[in-house]
Image: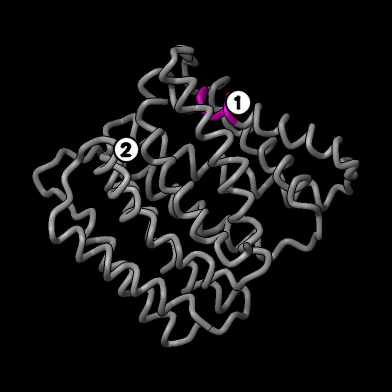
């Protein structure tokens, strides 16, 4: 069962890009994310109570998990949602964020003392080339500068969060750690709403369906799997699977949104898959 976790994660995480646009069509990005992580945090709280897990933890463990949530749920997701709300094409945003394994591989050596092999670097390079082929850059498209900057911030945040999560000194149950991370994300977005934006949410049927998908399948499902993989594998190997996300998202867009896939897209998907296999195999 554990061996298929990466594949489940890829499917669930990739599907989040499909439902982000419907969410920001009916809300501002920060209100949507505050709404999401308030429910997610409460859900993990109820699960912890049900499992009789210790919720009151020491200050150090709390700050570690809380900061991880600020980085991942706050800066990373906030950057992605904000960039798309400003007109950044979803595919290009996904591709930029997919540069994460390159940064993580570059930093995991000096920071985590992980040995990054030539084989892993080769897989990373192939993965990036394949993702670039799948998504491409439409030179004629209007890419907003503020959206580009927000996506770069998201890239730096998810890279930092991955390395930070690997360095955490606590051995908290995943549900307890996830609860405090959700609290960190909620707090970040709440502060953005209070000081920088006009909050609004239209609780339409489309919004509720898309938000339910991201709460239950992405936050409860994919994120928990990701934290498990980071905890039990090297950071550099774990994030290599992210290279499959842009191409998988493209396939989902073809299936659900009737977006066309060219032969170049299919070639890119194959190259990406080979790259991930090389980077993650023992």
Query: In the image shown, does 124 or 168 lie closer to the viewer?
Result: 124
- Checking the image for residue 231, the label placed there is none
Give percent across and percent down for residue 265.
Answer: 19, 58
The question of residue 144 being in magenta is answered with no
* Quadrant of the rendered image containing residue 5: bottom right
The outermost residue toward the front is 1
Left or right relative to 70: residue 24? left
Q: CA distance from mark 1 to mark 2?
A: 21 Å
Sort mark 2 into few (<14), some (14-19) or many (20+) by Cα contacts within 10 Å: some
User: Residue at 35% of width from left, 30% of height from top?
Assistant: 21
Magenta span dominant secondary structure? helix
Give percent across and percent down for residue 173.
Answer: 79, 52
Q: In the rendered image of this protein, does residue 69 appear above or below residue 203?
A: below
Secondary structure found at label 1: helix
Q: In the rendered image of this protein, does residue 124 appear above or below residue 246?
A: below
Residue topped by disc 2: 146
Sort mark 1 into few (<14), some (14-19) or many (20+) by Cα contacts within 10 Å: many
Q: Which region shows up in magenta?
A: 31-36
- Checking the image for residue 190, the label placed there is 1
Q: In the rendered image of this protein, does residue 244 appear above or below residue 203?
A: below
* Quadrant of the rendered image containing residue 184: top right
Left or right relative to 157: residue 152? left
Left or right relative to 263: residue 101? right
User: Residue at 48% of width from left, 75% of height from top?
Assistant: 280
The outermost residue toward the bottom is 118
């Amino acid at each position: 069962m554990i061996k298929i976790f990466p594949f489940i994660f890829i499917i669930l995480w990739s599907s989040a890009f499909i439902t982000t646009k419907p969410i920001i069509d009916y809300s501002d990005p920060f209100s949507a994310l505050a709404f999401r992580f308030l429910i997610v945090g409460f859900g993990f709280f109820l699960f912890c109570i049900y499992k009789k897990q210790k919720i009151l933890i020491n200050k150090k463990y709390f700050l570690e998990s809380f900061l991880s949530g600020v980085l991942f749920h706050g800066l990373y997701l906030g950057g992605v949602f904000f960039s798309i709300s400003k007109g950044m094409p979803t595919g290009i945003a996904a591709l930029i964020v997919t540069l994460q394994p390159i940064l993580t591989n570059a930093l995991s050596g000096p920071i985590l003392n992980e040995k990054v092999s030539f084989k892993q670097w080769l897989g990373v390079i192939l993965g990036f080339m394949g993702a670039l082929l799948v998504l491409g850059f439409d030179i004629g498209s209007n890419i907003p500068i503020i959206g580009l900057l927000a996506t770069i911030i998201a890239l730096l945040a998810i890279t930092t969060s991955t390395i930070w999560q690997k360095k955490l000194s606590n051995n908290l149950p995943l549900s307890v750690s996830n609860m405090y991370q959700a609290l960190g994300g909620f707090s970040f977005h709440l502060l953005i709403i209070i000081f920088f934006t006009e909050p609004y949410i239209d609780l339409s049927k489309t919004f509720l369906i898309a938000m339910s998908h991201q709460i239950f399948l992405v936050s409860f499902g994919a994120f928990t799997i990701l934290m498990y993989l980071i905890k039990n594998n090297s950071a550099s190997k774990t994030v290599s699977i992210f290279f499959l996300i842009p191409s998988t998202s493209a396939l989902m867009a073809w299936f659900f949104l009737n977006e066309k896939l060219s032969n170049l897209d299919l070639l890119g998907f194959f190259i990406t898959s080979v790259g991930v296999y090389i980077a993650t195999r023992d």
